Amino acid sequence: MKKSFKHLSWLLLLLIPLLIVSGCGKSSSKTVKVGIMGSDEKIWKPIQTKLKKEGINIKLVTFTDYNQPNAALTNHEIDLNSFQHTYFMNTWNKAHKTNIVSIGKTVRAPLRLYSKKVKTVSAIKKGDQITIPNDSTNEGRALHLLQSAGLIKVDNKVSLPTPKNITENKLKLKITPVDAAQTPRSLTDATAAIVNNEFASEAKLPDSECIYKEKLNKASIPYINIIATNKADKNNKTYKKIVKAYQTAETKKLLKKYYHGLSIPAW
Protein backbone atom coordinates (compact mmCIF):
# COMPACT_ATOMS: atom_id res chain seq x y z
CA MET A 1 0.00 0.00 0.00
CA LYS A 2 2.84 2.33 0.96
CA LYS A 3 4.67 1.47 -2.25
CA SER A 4 1.67 2.23 -4.45
CA PHE A 5 1.14 5.54 -2.61
CA LYS A 6 4.82 6.37 -3.23
CA HIS A 7 4.43 5.60 -6.93
CA LEU A 8 1.31 7.76 -7.12
CA SER A 9 3.12 10.64 -5.42
CA TRP A 10 5.99 10.42 -7.90
CA LEU A 11 3.54 10.30 -10.81
CA LEU A 12 1.79 13.45 -9.59
CA LEU A 13 5.13 15.21 -9.21
CA LEU A 14 5.95 14.36 -12.83
CA LEU A 15 2.53 15.46 -14.11
CA ILE A 16 2.37 18.86 -12.36
CA PRO A 17 5.07 20.54 -14.51
CA LEU A 18 3.39 19.20 -17.66
CA LEU A 19 0.04 20.61 -16.57
CA ILE A 20 1.64 23.97 -15.80
CA VAL A 21 3.34 24.11 -19.23
CA SER A 22 0.09 23.11 -20.93
CA GLY A 23 -1.83 25.79 -19.06
CA CYS A 24 0.76 28.43 -19.93
CA GLY A 25 0.55 27.49 -23.60
CA LYS A 26 -3.17 28.15 -23.65
CA SER A 27 -2.99 31.48 -21.85
CA SER A 28 -0.24 32.79 -24.16
CA SER A 29 -2.56 32.52 -27.17
CA LYS A 30 -4.13 35.94 -27.83
CA THR A 31 -7.33 36.70 -29.73
CA VAL A 32 -7.47 40.05 -31.51
CA LYS A 33 -10.64 41.27 -33.22
CA VAL A 34 -9.92 43.22 -36.41
CA GLY A 35 -12.67 45.21 -38.10
CA ILE A 36 -12.51 45.30 -41.91
CA MET A 37 -14.72 45.94 -44.92
CA GLY A 38 -15.95 42.71 -46.52
CA SER A 39 -13.83 42.99 -49.67
CA ASP A 40 -10.63 42.93 -47.61
CA GLU A 41 -11.17 39.40 -46.25
CA LYS A 42 -9.06 37.91 -49.04
CA ILE A 43 -6.12 40.10 -47.97
CA TRP A 44 -6.45 39.40 -44.25
CA LYS A 45 -7.12 35.62 -44.35
CA PRO A 46 -3.48 34.69 -45.16
CA ILE A 47 -2.28 37.08 -42.41
CA GLN A 48 -4.73 35.37 -40.04
CA THR A 49 -3.30 31.94 -40.93
CA LYS A 50 0.31 33.10 -40.58
CA LEU A 51 -0.18 34.70 -37.15
CA LYS A 52 -2.07 31.71 -35.76
CA LYS A 53 1.22 29.81 -35.87
CA GLU A 54 2.70 32.55 -33.67
CA GLY A 55 -0.04 32.27 -31.07
CA ILE A 56 -2.09 35.24 -32.28
CA ASN A 57 -5.67 34.40 -33.22
CA ILE A 58 -7.16 37.08 -35.44
CA LYS A 59 -10.94 37.21 -35.54
CA LEU A 60 -12.10 39.17 -38.58
CA VAL A 61 -15.21 41.27 -38.04
CA THR A 62 -16.68 42.53 -41.32
CA PHE A 63 -18.61 45.75 -41.77
CA THR A 64 -20.61 47.20 -44.66
CA ASP A 65 -20.89 50.81 -43.50
CA TYR A 66 -18.09 53.32 -42.83
CA ASN A 67 -19.77 54.53 -39.64
CA GLN A 68 -19.60 51.14 -37.92
CA PRO A 69 -15.89 50.18 -37.44
CA ASN A 70 -14.83 53.23 -35.41
CA ALA A 71 -17.90 53.04 -33.16
CA ALA A 72 -17.12 49.35 -32.55
CA LEU A 73 -13.48 50.21 -31.79
CA THR A 74 -14.41 52.90 -29.26
CA ASN A 75 -16.87 50.51 -27.60
CA HIS A 76 -14.13 47.82 -27.41
CA GLU A 77 -16.20 45.43 -29.53
CA ILE A 78 -13.08 45.14 -31.72
CA ASP A 79 -9.39 45.78 -30.99
CA LEU A 80 -8.19 47.13 -34.35
CA ASN A 81 -9.74 48.26 -37.59
CA SER A 82 -8.39 48.52 -41.10
CA PHE A 83 -10.69 50.43 -43.44
CA GLN A 84 -10.08 54.17 -43.16
CA HIS A 85 -7.59 56.80 -44.20
CA THR A 86 -5.95 59.30 -41.84
CA TYR A 87 -8.24 62.16 -42.83
CA PHE A 88 -11.35 60.07 -42.10
CA MET A 89 -9.94 59.08 -38.69
CA ASN A 90 -9.09 62.66 -37.74
CA THR A 91 -12.52 63.90 -38.81
CA TRP A 92 -14.20 61.09 -36.87
CA ASN A 93 -12.18 61.84 -33.73
CA LYS A 94 -13.13 65.52 -33.90
CA ALA A 95 -16.83 64.85 -34.48
CA HIS A 96 -17.20 62.06 -31.89
CA LYS A 97 -14.58 63.17 -29.31
CA THR A 98 -12.76 59.84 -29.62
CA ASN A 99 -9.07 58.91 -29.33
CA ILE A 100 -8.43 56.61 -32.27
CA VAL A 101 -4.85 56.54 -33.60
CA SER A 102 -2.94 55.02 -36.50
CA ILE A 103 -0.38 52.30 -35.76
CA GLY A 104 0.59 51.49 -39.36
CA LYS A 105 0.03 52.27 -43.03
CA THR A 106 -1.70 49.86 -45.39
CA VAL A 107 -2.63 51.18 -48.85
CA ARG A 108 -3.33 54.18 -51.00
CA ALA A 109 -6.70 53.83 -52.67
CA PRO A 110 -7.26 56.61 -55.23
CA LEU A 111 -10.91 57.56 -55.73
CA ARG A 112 -12.19 56.87 -59.24
CA LEU A 113 -14.94 58.30 -61.39
CA TYR A 114 -16.79 55.49 -63.18
CA SER A 115 -19.36 55.55 -65.96
CA LYS A 116 -21.31 53.01 -67.98
CA LYS A 117 -22.69 55.73 -70.28
CA VAL A 118 -19.68 57.82 -71.37
CA LYS A 119 -16.05 57.02 -72.12
CA THR A 120 -14.44 60.35 -71.19
CA VAL A 121 -15.00 63.24 -68.78
CA SER A 122 -15.48 65.59 -71.75
CA ALA A 123 -18.50 63.51 -72.85
CA ILE A 124 -20.45 64.40 -69.70
CA LYS A 125 -23.31 66.69 -70.75
CA LYS A 126 -25.32 69.51 -69.25
CA GLY A 127 -27.72 68.33 -66.53
CA ASP A 128 -26.12 64.89 -66.12
CA GLN A 129 -26.21 63.26 -62.70
CA ILE A 130 -23.07 62.28 -60.79
CA THR A 131 -23.34 60.37 -57.51
CA ILE A 132 -20.75 60.69 -54.74
CA PRO A 133 -20.25 59.03 -51.30
CA ASN A 134 -22.28 60.79 -48.61
CA ASP A 135 -19.97 60.43 -45.59
CA SER A 136 -18.45 63.85 -44.87
CA THR A 137 -14.80 62.97 -45.57
CA ASN A 138 -15.27 61.10 -48.83
CA GLU A 139 -17.96 63.54 -49.97
CA GLY A 140 -15.48 66.41 -49.70
CA ARG A 141 -12.77 64.33 -51.30
CA ALA A 142 -15.11 63.43 -54.18
CA LEU A 143 -15.96 67.08 -54.83
CA HIS A 144 -12.25 67.91 -54.97
CA LEU A 145 -11.87 65.08 -57.50
CA LEU A 146 -14.65 66.54 -59.68
CA GLN A 147 -12.90 69.92 -59.44
CA SER A 148 -9.56 68.43 -60.55
CA ALA A 149 -11.43 66.80 -63.46
CA GLY A 150 -12.59 70.29 -64.51
CA LEU A 151 -16.29 69.65 -63.95
CA ILE A 152 -16.95 72.01 -61.02
CA LYS A 153 -15.26 74.49 -58.71
CA VAL A 154 -15.56 74.46 -54.93
CA ASP A 155 -14.75 76.95 -52.20
CA ASN A 156 -11.10 76.14 -51.47
CA LYS A 157 -11.35 77.77 -48.05
CA VAL A 158 -13.50 74.81 -46.98
CA SER A 159 -11.42 71.69 -46.22
CA LEU A 160 -14.39 69.31 -46.46
CA PRO A 161 -16.80 70.82 -48.96
CA THR A 162 -20.39 69.69 -49.48
CA PRO A 163 -22.52 70.35 -52.59
CA LYS A 164 -23.48 73.65 -50.92
CA ASN A 165 -19.85 74.77 -51.31
CA ILE A 166 -19.82 74.37 -55.09
CA THR A 167 -19.00 77.83 -56.48
CA GLU A 168 -19.14 76.97 -60.19
CA ASN A 169 -21.15 74.31 -62.02
CA LYS A 170 -21.33 75.38 -65.66
CA LEU A 171 -22.91 72.12 -66.80
CA LYS A 172 -25.54 72.33 -64.03
CA LEU A 173 -24.62 68.78 -63.02
CA LYS A 174 -26.82 67.05 -60.46
CA ILE A 175 -24.30 66.11 -57.76
CA THR A 176 -26.10 63.52 -55.61
CA PRO A 177 -24.61 62.17 -52.34
CA VAL A 178 -25.58 58.54 -51.66
CA ASP A 179 -24.40 55.83 -49.27
CA ALA A 180 -20.88 54.84 -50.37
CA ALA A 181 -21.92 51.18 -50.73
CA GLN A 182 -24.66 52.22 -53.19
CA THR A 183 -22.43 54.20 -55.57
CA PRO A 184 -21.72 51.24 -57.92
CA ARG A 185 -25.44 50.44 -58.14
CA SER A 186 -26.24 54.09 -58.89
CA LEU A 187 -24.40 53.76 -62.22
CA THR A 188 -27.58 52.20 -63.65
CA ASP A 189 -29.27 55.62 -63.58
CA ALA A 190 -26.53 58.22 -63.07
CA THR A 191 -24.16 59.24 -65.85
CA ALA A 192 -21.18 58.74 -63.54
CA ALA A 193 -20.32 57.88 -59.94
CA ILE A 194 -17.32 58.30 -57.69
CA VAL A 195 -16.71 54.91 -56.09
CA ASN A 196 -14.36 53.92 -53.27
CA ASN A 197 -12.03 51.06 -54.18
CA GLU A 198 -13.50 48.36 -51.90
CA PHE A 199 -16.98 48.89 -53.37
CA ALA A 200 -15.56 49.05 -56.90
CA SER A 201 -13.85 45.73 -56.23
CA GLU A 202 -16.98 44.11 -54.77
CA ALA A 203 -19.05 45.31 -57.75
CA LYS A 204 -16.32 44.11 -60.16
CA LEU A 205 -16.31 47.45 -61.98
CA PRO A 206 -13.94 47.06 -64.93
CA ASP A 207 -11.01 49.42 -65.35
CA SER A 208 -12.42 50.33 -68.78
CA GLU A 209 -15.32 52.10 -67.03
CA CYS A 210 -12.99 54.36 -65.04
CA ILE A 211 -12.95 57.75 -66.78
CA TYR A 212 -10.91 59.69 -64.20
CA LYS A 213 -8.92 58.93 -61.06
CA GLU A 214 -7.41 60.80 -58.15
CA LYS A 215 -3.80 61.88 -58.56
CA LEU A 216 -1.23 60.49 -56.13
CA ASN A 217 0.72 63.48 -54.83
CA LYS A 218 1.41 65.37 -51.58
CA ALA A 219 -2.24 66.38 -51.37
CA SER A 220 -3.26 62.70 -51.27
CA ILE A 221 -1.01 61.75 -48.32
CA PRO A 222 -3.81 62.25 -45.73
CA TYR A 223 -5.80 59.65 -47.69
CA ILE A 224 -3.35 56.82 -47.01
CA ASN A 225 -5.25 53.96 -45.38
CA ILE A 226 -4.20 52.74 -41.96
CA ILE A 227 -4.56 50.14 -39.22
CA ALA A 228 -6.07 51.94 -36.23
CA THR A 229 -6.64 51.31 -32.53
CA ASN A 230 -7.59 53.21 -29.40
CA LYS A 231 -4.86 55.56 -28.16
CA ALA A 232 -4.48 53.60 -24.90
CA ASP A 233 -3.44 50.54 -26.94
CA LYS A 234 -1.07 52.18 -29.41
CA ASN A 235 2.05 50.50 -27.93
CA ASN A 236 0.51 47.03 -27.68
CA LYS A 237 3.22 44.57 -28.84
CA THR A 238 0.73 42.08 -30.29
CA TYR A 239 -0.90 44.80 -32.37
CA LYS A 240 2.51 45.86 -33.68
CA LYS A 241 3.17 42.25 -34.75
CA ILE A 242 -0.09 42.33 -36.71
CA VAL A 243 0.98 45.51 -38.51
CA LYS A 244 4.35 43.90 -39.33
CA ALA A 245 2.58 40.79 -40.64
CA TYR A 246 0.47 42.99 -42.94
CA GLN A 247 3.39 45.02 -44.30
CA THR A 248 5.05 42.22 -46.27
CA ALA A 249 5.92 41.31 -49.85
CA GLU A 250 3.22 38.60 -49.67
CA THR A 251 0.54 41.21 -48.96
CA LYS A 252 1.79 43.33 -51.88
CA LYS A 253 1.28 40.34 -54.18
CA LEU A 254 -2.24 39.76 -52.84
CA LEU A 255 -3.16 43.44 -53.32
CA LYS A 256 -1.97 43.26 -56.92
CA LYS A 257 -3.79 39.97 -57.51
CA TYR A 258 -7.17 41.00 -56.08
CA TYR A 259 -7.31 44.77 -56.56
CA HIS A 260 -5.46 45.17 -59.88
CA GLY A 261 -4.09 48.61 -58.98
CA LEU A 262 -7.16 49.85 -57.09
CA SER A 263 -5.18 49.61 -53.84
CA ILE A 264 -1.48 50.48 -53.85
CA PRO A 265 0.86 49.48 -50.97
CA ALA A 266 1.73 52.53 -48.87
CA TRP A 267 4.46 51.22 -46.54
Image (spheres, grey):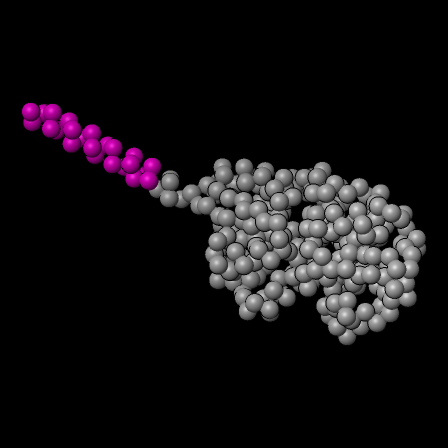
Image quadrant assignment for residue 26: top left
Residue 134, image x, y percentages: 70, 60
Residue reaching furthest to the left: 1
Q: Residue at x 75, y 68 (%)?
A: 161
Q: Residue at x 78, y 71 (%)?
A: 165
Q: Residue at x 52, y 41 (%)?
A: 51
Q: Is residue 21 magenta?
A: yes
Q: Determine if residue 168 is in view.
A: yes
Image quadrant assignment for residue 169: bottom right
Left or right for 110, reference 123: left
The relative height of residue 108 versus residue 174 in the rendered view (above or below) is above
Q: Residue at x 80, y 61 (%)?
A: 175
Residue reaching furthest to the bottom: 157
Residue 10, image x, y percentages: 18, 30
Residue 215, image x, y percentages: 81, 56
Q: Determine if residue 103 is in view.
A: no
Q: Quadrant of the N terminus?
A: top left
Q: Is residue 56 magenta?
A: no
Instruction: Give the camera-side residue of 34 and 2.
Output: 34
Left or right for 46, reference 17: right
Magenta residues span: 1-23
Q: Main secondary structure of the magenta part?
A: helix
Residue 38, image x, y percentages: 62, 45
Numbered circles on residues, count: 0
Left or right for 15, reference 145: left
The relative height of residue 224 versus residue 247 in the rendered view (above or below) is below
